Image: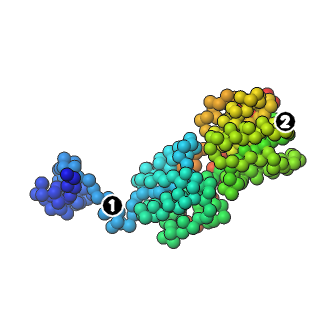
Amino acid sequence: MIAKEVTIYDIAKELNVSASTVSRALNNNALICKSTTKRIIEKAGELGYRPNNFASNLRRQKTNTIGVVLHELNSSFITSVLAGIENVTAEAGYDIIITHSKENHETEVANVKNLYNKRVDGIIVSLSLTSKNLDHFAPFVEKKTPIVFFDRVNESTDIPHVVIDNYNCGYIATKHLLEQGCKRIAILTSNLKRNVYYQRHRGYTDALLDAKIKYDEAIVLVKDLTEESGIEAAHEILNMQARPDGLFVTNDLEAVLCMQELMLHGVRIPEDLAVVGFNNDAISKIANPKLSTIDYPGQQMGEATAKNLINFLNGNRSMGSINKTIIKSELLIRESSMRKK
């Protein structure tokens, strides 16, 4: 048997007051005296009353929920981003619904449609590696429902987004390896159609150009972001006739796994190969040697993204008023790249 849901009419009957009095008291209406409000709230708790937020939200045309569309869940970066988002949304009185595309365009489309059908008040999005277009966000745009992208974004649209300066990060990581005496620097990255990897690769390319070092596609390794790809990349490096003496990896986990596999086969880090990663994940601090990396402040990015969305929802900004927010990042130099002590 399913227990009957307690209503305001049940409370009213128990206390011999009108349903409208109960409703006002539960909403802290000043017209109801404090003693009556106290009695009603206590009785509601005693009977197990739950407010029907769904019906209330339908009347107000607002759900007080924000959808979050993520490309993955198993990274410390995304965990810290979520912490930042939740800090801001909870304080503003919003719940969040988290969806996970698993780096798949079709799953992302289905997740976005589901959030639209749930009538979320706004969405926060990081695109999957295989996202083909932004057509699935059109219903939100048509309804003027706020969207803010972060990290993996489409920079060709007017939809607001929060990023770091990925180009500059790629440049300074490569420049650091050059300053350590590296002459042949490989890059291990992912889908260059995504803004983050495209811009990091562009920074890498320009740093080589400025140092008058020829770009060599043979040492540009484009992989997915799995654990296996880091190990696979290590074996490709081991099999190169002209091995690189520097390696820039656009993901810390891949960097550490690649580094460990290379060391198992006798490669000395950083003497034979200096390595720089990206994200400043926890693994970068416990790797041996500790991994030089680009600090990517996930919580700060999550907070900035959520604040932008809340400002749009509160009418403090119009959707066309701000397009791009850049979060500051920096290179953290550790043992893995320090060829020059």
Q: Secondary structure at mark 1?
A: helix
Residue closest to the eye, 118 or 65: 118
Name the amino acid type tagged 1.
Answer: Phe
The residue at the far right in this view is 212
Q: Quadrant of residue 106?
A: bottom right
- Observer able to see residue 332: no
Q: Residues within 10 Å of mark 1 (few under 14, many from 20)?
A: few
Q: Residue at x 63, y 32 (%)?
A: 285
On the picture, is 270 further left or further right than 36? right
**Residue 234 percent across, percent down from the top left:** 73, 38
Q: Residue at x 54, y 69 (%)?
A: 138
Residue closest to the eye, 134 or 234: 234
Above or below residue 56? Residue 200 is above
> Could you say which disc has been placed on residue 140 in the image?
none
- Mark 1 sits on what residue? 54
Name the amino acid type tagged 2.
Answer: Gly
- Observer able to see residue 120: yes
> Could you say which disc has been placed on residue 181 in the image?
2
Q: Secondary structure at mark 2?
A: loop
The residue at the far bottom in this view is 142
On the picture, is 257 further left or further right than 88? right
